[in-house]
Image (cartoon, coloured by chain):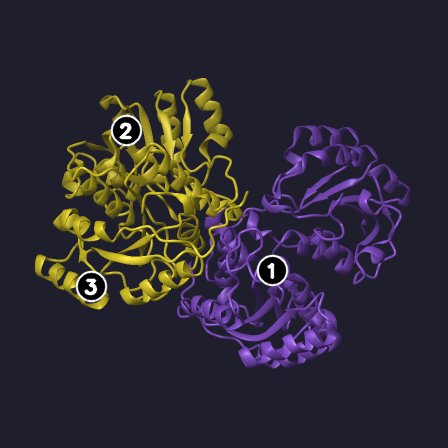
Chain colours: A purple, B yellow
């Protein structure tokens, strides 16, 4: 079991989805967060939906008094580059004997300054995003017995991972064996396994997705619930979304949408309507292995109760599908509505590469 | 100027599209091909559409008498792995003082046996597929002034690169400045620049495509003609196809189809109809920056003249677009029909990342 100090200077409140995901869902404990902007307060005082009294401190040096085993890089910046001003804090953690856990594209273990320091202080660096050797997509995913549900979204960072984690919990609460499949760095940190598909060489991205589904299948689940990535109309990340759509061979799709989003973040591309999103994804799946949208999970964060209820009703009406906010209302009702729709579907070709 | 010996043992006739592309279109000379199955014959005797009298020999040792400067790996196997039985031939070439030019995913310069040998014999290894450092997609491609045409196909290896090279030639023959944009290893070997998009980390694949279009734009062309990759319903490679569709920001699409293909090679997924392909691609482009299909280039290799004419007529009827086989009939007519349709189109968002 790890005990985390989480590094998120200046970003913990609003721009640290890795930190929030690990605090909210990992079985590893978070003992401190490093963010000078909120030093002296606790996690739940700054992010009320996180049930944690861990202290926020100004520096890594301050965090050491809480006996962390590991420093976790708590943000996922666009492009995955290490902010240069964080180098000193990471070196301080290594000097303090902490393991470094990073989901950045920049591989910290390949950085000679970090690597040398880690050797000197006998600490390890876990670059979560570093992919293993991955074979090409083979079609073996088509033979997985358990129904596969994949989350798709109206943008990045709208809550796809959270929704899938909540549904997996709801499934387990009703005595079902549901396997959460991590496809990004935060999911991997939470589950302790997985592949960051966005880091995989493009030719092998579908193969990586297939390997994830096959690994989940080896755990003999009744349902396989896959964390989604990106968005199908995201100018930069859509190829990763398509890799999941094809490589995970889903039987069903769950649409996850932030109701306040009007444009793709940073890029300004207009968001698609719920029905437009469903059509775009179902059309693509229909080229290889049909999959049907079975529900809508809304992120109504920031709305009041009656506004949220209105948004949920509007989504139900537009899509004729079960819809809910699983963070606001709990995942039980949506899971109960969606689970009976999770049935196996057949690919257009069952021929598997030898 | 390089003089190539091309390594394609047992594969030169039917499975060596890299070799055929370089022999047909590179300004570098091919002085010999290594394939024991056809030793003693010439290139054009085995592959009649290639206008080359270069000898085919059994081994790299035999090829050395023709004074090559470089050994080019002449095939692009699925997954890009080096066939182990080729190691000895590559080492022989290094011992013979030849530069090694490879488009495999396996990076030969990172192989300690090859690297040691190359150092000992003072030869270089050019891994064509090794990507440079690539930024995220920014939207700068939307500001390129020249119209951008992208080839899309009904499968891999149907002739997309050849069609684009032929159209670029036709454009230049009529006094227009058309820039060929290489997106895969053979195109890079032919043009001497480019990025193998299939080798790029998934998050950066759209960024790589954008960089290619920006590099082409710096050469001040009237038209930018982009070699396509993969197929939108290819189970393994579709994410690369989508990266080109989004990252190259095309204004127009050219459908390239092998008329004999009924299923995606290896995987057995049914091929889409011409109109189905056009709809699938136009729908995706419509999510970010609309692009219209402007023509169909058919690969009618193996058909007789009247069968080929029938296929071309059928494609015209089904799509209401200009259609031709540019290898069989020359590229002039199709280019003349397509060029007036190459006009700039606007993205849904013109906001570019700062």
Residue bearing mark 2: B4
- Nearer the camera: disc 1 or disc 3: 3
Q: Residue drawn 37% across and 46% down?
A: B77
Say whether disc 3 or disc 2 marks the residue closer to the N-terminus.
2
In the rendered image, residue B238, in percent from the top left (x then y), is placed at 42, 56
In the image, B82: left or right of A115? Answer: left
In the image, B222: left or right of A201? Answer: left
Q: Quadrant of the C terminus of chain A?
A: bottom left
Q: Secondary structure at mark 3?
A: helix
Residue bearing mark 3: B315
Q: Residue furthest left?
A: B306
| Circle 3 chain | B
Q: Is residue A74 above or below residue A148?
A: above
Q: Is residue A34 visible?
A: no
CA neighbours of label 2 inside 10 A, class few (<14), some (14 to 19), many (20+): many
Q: Residue drawn 23% across and 61% down?
A: B260
Q: Are marks 3 and 2 on the same chain?
A: yes
In the rendered image, residue B108, in percent from the top left (x then y), is placed at 45, 33
In the rendered image, residue B229, in percent from the top left (x then y), is placed at 36, 50
Q: Is residue A325 above or below residue A22?
A: below
Residue bearing mark 1: A215
């Amino acid at each position: 079991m790890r005990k985390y100090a989480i590094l998120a200077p200046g970003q913990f409140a609003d721009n640290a989805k890795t930190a929030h995901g690990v605090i909210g869902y990992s079985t590893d404990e978070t003992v401190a967060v490093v963010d000078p902007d909120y030093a002296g307060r606790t996690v739940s005082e700054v992010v009320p939906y996180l049930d944690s009294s861990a202290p926020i401190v100004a520096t890594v040096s301050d965090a050491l008094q809480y006996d962390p085993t590991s420093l976790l890089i708590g943000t996922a910046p666009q492009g995955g580059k290490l902010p240069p001003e964080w180098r000193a804090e990471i070196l301080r953690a290594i000097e303090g004997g902490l393991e470094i856990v990073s989901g950045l594209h920049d591989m910290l273990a390949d950085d000679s300054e970090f690597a040398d320091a880690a050797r000197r202080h006998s600490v390890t660096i876990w670059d979560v995003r570093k992919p293993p050797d991955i074979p090409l997509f083979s079609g073996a995913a088509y033979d997985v017995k358990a129904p596969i549900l994949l989350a798709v979204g109206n943008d990045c960072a709208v809550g796809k991972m959270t929704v899938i984690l909540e549904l997996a919990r709801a499934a387990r609460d009703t005595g079902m064996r549901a396997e959460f499949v991590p496809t990004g760095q935060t999911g991997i940190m939470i589950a302790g396994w997985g592949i960051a598909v966005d880091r995989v060489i493009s030719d092998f991205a579908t193969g990586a997705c297939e390997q994830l589904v096959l690994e989940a299948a080896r755990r003999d689940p009744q349902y396989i619930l896959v964390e989604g990535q990106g968005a199908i109309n995201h100018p930069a990340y859509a190829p990763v979304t398509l890799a999941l759509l094809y490589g995970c061979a889903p039987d069903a799709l769950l649409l996850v949408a932030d109701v306040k989003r009007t444009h793709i973040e940073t890029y300004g591309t207009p968001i698609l309507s719920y029905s437009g999103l469903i059509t775009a994804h179902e059309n693509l799946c229909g080229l290889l292995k049909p999959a049907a949208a079975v529900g809508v999970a809304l992120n109504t964060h920031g709305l009041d109760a009656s506004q949220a209820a209105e948004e949920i009703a509007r989504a139900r009406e537009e899509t004729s599908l079960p819809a809910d906010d699983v963070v606001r209302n709990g995942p039980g009702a949506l899971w109960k509505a969606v689970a009976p729709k999770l049935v196996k579907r057949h690919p257009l070709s069952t021929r598997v590469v030898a």
